[in-house]
Each structure stands twice: as C-alpha cells, then as structure tokens.
Amino acid sequence: MKEKEIFDYLIHEIKNSSQSIVLSAGIMKKLMTRDEFPKESVLKLVSRLGEQAEALYDQVRDAGLYFREENFPLTFDLHALINDIIDEYKPFMTSGNTNIQTEYDLTIRNVIQDEFKVRTIIVNLLKNSIEASKRSGTIKLSTSVAGGAVSVIVENNGPVIPEELIKKIFEPMFTTKKTGTGLGLAIVSRFAKNIQGSVKVNSSDTRTYFILTFPGSLK
C-alpha cells in the first residue's frame, strides 16, 4: 500500500471518528435539557464518547508514529527498558491468568539505538501477545546477542498464525480485530527497518515468536 493511500485512509477514519463524537455530544446535550433527566441514557452516551475519543486518539497517535522517519540514537539499558514496559502493562493482565517471564542475556548491558523506536516495537509486540493469549497462559520476553546484533524475542501461547496471514500481518491497515487502527504491526516493521533491523515471526500450534533484531553497539 502506498503512503498516499495510507494517509487518505487515516484521514477518512479520523473524520468518521470525529463525526461520531460530535453526533454523540449533540444527542447528550439534548437529553440533558429534558425536565426528566434520563441518567441511564446519558451514562451510555458518556461511555460511548469515551470509546470514540479513545479510538480517535489511537488513530492520530498511530498515524504520527507510522510517518516518523528520524532516528535519535541514545545509550540505554535494554533490560531496564523491557522491565519498565512489563510493569506498565501488568495491569492489563490482572483479570486473567496470563503471566510474563523474562530470560535475559546478561552480556547485554547498555545499547546505542533509538530508544523510542525500540520501546514502541516491544510495546506493540507485547500488546499483540497479550491479546493473542486471551488473558491466559505465559508470555516470555528474552534477549540474545550474536555478531553485534541484539535480538528481543516476544513469545506467546496464542493460536497459530496461518502462513497466509504471516505474509500480511505487517502490512498497513491489515487487521483481524474488530477494533484498532491496523497500524500496530506495520509500525513495528517500519521502525525495525528505520533502525537497520528486522522483525520476523515463527508460529506453531504451541507458541508464536516475534523476533526483533537490530544493531545495538553494545557498551
């Protein structure tokens, strides 16, 4: 898909989301002028407004991320970064039986790379694994290094990804979900290329692995 097509699609989706918010707000305003205040109806609309506003935010955020080209290399602790991401997303797993394990190559200390892009990639892969695991099972994040290239592996026990889908999941706007922008894994692929790295997928009946590899300039 060409970037102009992606841009046009995003503008279309953002307009739809904005229009939905305006319509919901207008209905709620009319309901609140009634003598008998329809509390339940207004609460439903407030909830819908929140969902619509969140969807709009996601679309604008992902559009901004997708078209971000510049790299800003910094020295950072890769394992500390991964631990921070895990702590941030633990609340999303409290209602289920999903747990996260880590296995780090301790020869990796600080790396020099675009920290924001590495973080964004790992966040999107972790979110994808949480959704695939359906709040049950084990997600594992591990690291390794070979020939100056650092790898971060995010694996889950979700359903196998068919080969025909693996070929498409990194394409912009491709999604099997009812919600979302369809840019999450496309951003992963684009950012991996931006930092001179790559991301691959291996999927079987028992585990699915997303493998991010990038030059890290270990320090």
Image (spheres, rainbow, N blue to C red):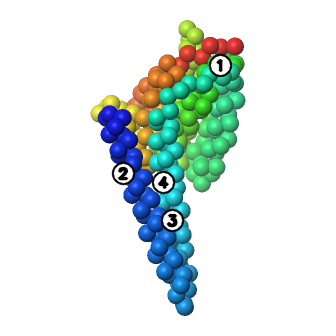
For the question of whether residue 106 can be seen, the reply is: no
Sequence-first disc among 2 and 3: 2
78 vs 62: above or below = above
- Name the residue beneath numbered marker 2: 12
Q: Residue flagged by tag 4: what amino acid is it?
A: Leu
Q: Who is closer to the viewer here, 21 or 177?
A: 21
Give the residue type that dot 1 points to. Answer: Val
Question: Label 4 belongs to which residue?
Answer: 56
Q: Disc 3 and disc 4: Cα gap in Å?
A: 10 Å
2 or 1: mark nearer the eye: 2
Q: Amino acid at mark 3?
A: Leu
Residue 186 can be seen, yes or no: yes
Q: Nearer the viewer, residue 152 or 66?
A: 66
Around disc 1, counting alpha carbons within 10 Å, would you say few (fewer than 14), some (14 to 19), or many (20 or more)? many
Q: Secondary structure at mark 3?
A: helix
Residue placed under numbered mark 1 in the picture: 111
x then y, percent, for residue 191? 49, 28
Q: Position of residue 62 (x, y in %)?
A: 48, 42
